[in-house]
Image: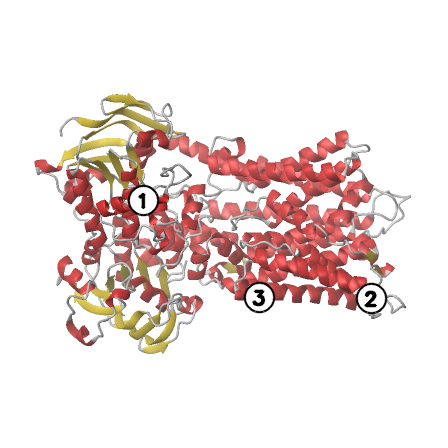
Amino acid sequence: MSEQMEPVLAAAEPVAEPSNSRLRAVFGPVGRFCGARSRELKETTSGGARKFGMVFALLALIIFFQWRAPGGVLTSSNAQTMILGNSFILVMTMGMVMVIIAGHIDLSVGSVAATVGTLVALATHESTAVISGWGWPRWAGVLLGLAIGLSIGALQGFLVAYVGIPGFITTLAGMMIWRGVGMWILAANGSNIPVPYEMRFLGGGHLPDIWSRSVFNLNGTTLILGVLGITLVVLGEFRKRATAKRLEGKAPLLWISATRTGIFVAVIGYLTWLFGSGRAGTGFPVPGVIILVLAAIYWFITTKTINGRNVYAVGGNKHAAALSGVNIKRTNFLVMMNMSLLASVAAIIFVSRSWRTGLADGTGWELDVIASVFIGGAAVSGGVGTVIGSLIGGMVMVVLNNGLILMGVGTAQTNIIKGVVLIAAVAFDVYNKVQGRPSLIGKMIDGLRPKKGDEATLLDKAAPVA
Amino acid sequence: MTHPILEMRSITKTFPGVIALEDVNFTVKQGEIHAICGENGAGKSTLMKVLSGVHPHGSYTGEIIYRGEPVSFNTIRQSEEAGIVIIHQELALIPELSVAENIFLGNEQKGAFGIDWTAAHEKARELTRMVGLDADTRTPIKNLGVGQQQLVEIARALAKNVELLILDEPTAALNEDDSALLLDLLRDLRAKGLTCVIISHKLNEIMAISDQITVIRDGLCIETMNVNAGDVSEDRIIAAMVGRSLDSRFPPHTPNIGEVFFEVEGWTVEHPEIPGRLVAKGSSFNVRRGEIVGFAGIMGAGRTELARSIFGRTYGRYLGGTIYIDGEEVKLPSVPAAIKHKISYVPEDRKVYGLNLLDDIQTTVVSADWKKVKEHGALSNSAIHEAGEAARSALGIKAHSVSVNVATLSGGNQQKTLLGKWLFPEPELLIVDEPTRGIDVGAKYEIYGLINELADAGKGVVVISSELPELIGLCDRIYTICEGAVTGVVARGETDQEQLMRLMTGVETHGAFTQTTISTESNEGR
């Protein structure tokens, strides 16, 4: 706060004593104690109750499948398969969480991906008797795919933000339209367009070896990535302690910092070994790297930029956001456009890995993506959700899919189980939030979300004054 | 008339870590209007929730004697069956349904084949006549004003054969006229034998209507005063509520007024949805440095609309008018432009227009001016934290940390946080819209103090309020607005509530404003 304002504020010391000082005198020590405890806990977990819960749910799932699934989920090749086979879903969760935070939904992602994938394949394929390909270079094909995603997103974003058609309707229509467009183009080209083998690197490639695996069986580039990750975690912890010291006069307790850092270092170290020690020529998958890069970008956007914070403001209370100078239409436009852009990234990764495009590409993707975001802690009413949480939610879905396949559970049962998990995850949160009952986590992490009554009031009164 | 209809004996209710009510005794006599006063969080609502079964029997200690018999309600339905009905501050009506449908919601008039709508409307007409509601029973609730909606709530309670009616802040959202009508209705109902318990912050109304007043503070029953005995005054009630004597409800203030720096001329704005209807009709006003200017008007007169249309054109369609800051014409086509020109607007109804209830204190404080917490191109958590801490200590926001969610704060602390948000861009002109609605006396006093401090620092402050005593006590000058037109301006100490009321209703115009067109389409205001 600048000097200009200080005299005003400094002079405005509280005039009245706290009216409940008697209560404070009685309950002060207890209150302080509880407060301190919950703050410590927050420091170790630094996240909402559901995200916190979801990390444990993910761990529990992994342990369960490691125990029950033949061969276990934690093998190098299976871990690589999990990432390779599901990276497109994880990419899209990062866009979907922003759409959902802003209070919308996007049902069209699978169909947009199908259209984009088909056009990328068509553009990069040589012209043949059956396939009227354009013979573009691969990089041009990728750029075309991204441009198409951006254009579709701009169109849908325009309809949602500036015309005012609800996102649900716009993208329901988009789901039909882009599915149709993709099928039409594909059908005119023999229903099956191969993608150049060289593009496989993007969707199915691994980080390269830099030394002979017969000398030391660990993928070199994966090791470098792991070391980089550990360095960032350690540096980040030091920075966090320094900031806390500056702001609050004391750093978090040393054991908390050490434990937290230790856990992260151990996890990254283990993952490095897990992904790096497989067959020669395999390592951490390239699409996994794409996800990490995108996660860093979108984490930054949602937490460290004004445009990102505006998404939360619009979803939390759009009246207040409008009166605070947030350009609501532009924000809605951007989140919808960004979603289709990420759908095109997902499409490129997907067709690169599968070598070809087919009529069923992208079918049902939106359901997995939306489920991941809600499992990851977003709220249907908007305003709540995180990129990291959604990725964890996505990993829950991925591990579930993978583990059930390993156990030989059929598609029918897998669908049922996934639905039950979605309901359970959201019910867990609703129970904690609405009832305000003394549950383990909800009690310890106080005051994270408003009570339901407030939200209801907000909705009731949302009509403009006139 | 003197035997009690309700006795609550030694009620103690605890929540984890807090005693909400401690050994409270509360007795209501048959056929009286009994007011409960207390600051926010004092325990008034908890007491009523214990009575109505929201907090079920067994979750509190003590006993409730109703009509001579001990009762133990576990649900609201049980207490309603016994004739105890609560009308909450936030009305529980469904906007899309009709008056009759709302009156009988959950209490439907069943005929031989489903709901008997003929009977329902007939009964509803009778009830609306009884409460003085002049509206067709088929009108959707959303087409009624707040005052009329309040009457529907009372009709709904009467439909349930209410014996003890509890009203939580019934006049908080009403203008003076509607409030007066409601109070008259309550007197009528009392004459017909209905017993009322009324929770209110408006002491003048309480004084006017109640037979007895019980003051609750910090979960304790402080005293019950008999109004008819004659020795009850507003000051005595306030003293009991806050636990000390407040010399006055307004902190002492010697204005130090400078030059005119903010001027609006001929401001004309059209309603956003109804073409041709003007919400501001060539309005002109000015604000001087160090001055507190009030806007008085009945609800729907266009005070908020005027303020918001000036603040970045966030309301209606701009048709004409000029804004001058320090003599220079400026255009404020957007909120960022208004903020850039050092104008802040603290909206009414903080939960709807002011706060994102999902945010914590620090995020709320910086949310109107994120640019100030940017470091090296990224938002800085430590800058946000520091801004939050500065606001917390300067405004006296009571919370154990600035990462506490604003939804969990009391009304007064929410209002202070909202003020902090709009002081953060360092405004020269601060427009505050209903700054003390629904907050307790102590917090009001703090907000008044803050407004005075801002004026002393040379800022201009515009206060929009529906509480005339507040405007008279706080402002150096008051503009009156009636149906979109400025009808008068009066200086501190030169006016009283009656004159303001005449100006606000267009019965009288004042000073230079006699030329201002007074609307002839007076029925268009809502």
Q: Residue placed at 16% from the left, 39% from the top?
A: B210
Kind of residue at badge 3: Phe
Q: Which of the marked residues, 3 or 2, is nearer the chain's N terminus?
A: 2
Do pointers 3 and 2 mark residues of a single chain?
Answer: yes
Whole-angstrom CA distance, mark 3 to mark 1, is: 40 Å
Q: Is residue A419 left or right of residue B255?
A: right
Which element type, helix, strand or loop, lies under badge 2? helix
Q: Residue placed at 19% from the left, 68% from the top?
A: B489
Give the residue number, with chain letter if any, for mark 3: A158
Which element type, helix, strand or loop, lies under badge 3? helix
Q: Residue placed at 81% from the left, 32% from the top?
A: A70
Give the residue number, with chain letter if any, for mark 1: B89
Tell me residue B324's x, y (percent).
32, 75
Whole-angstrom CA distance, mark 2 to mark 1, is: 65 Å
Q: Is residue B80 left or right of residue B362?
A: left
Give the residue number, with chain letter if any, for mark 2: A124
Tell me residue B445's x, y (percent).
25, 49
Q: Chain of mark 3?
A: A
- Residue sitting nearer the eye, A293 or B322: B322
Q: Residue placed at 72% from the left, 31% from the top?
A: A64
Which residue is situated farthest in the bottom direction here? B328
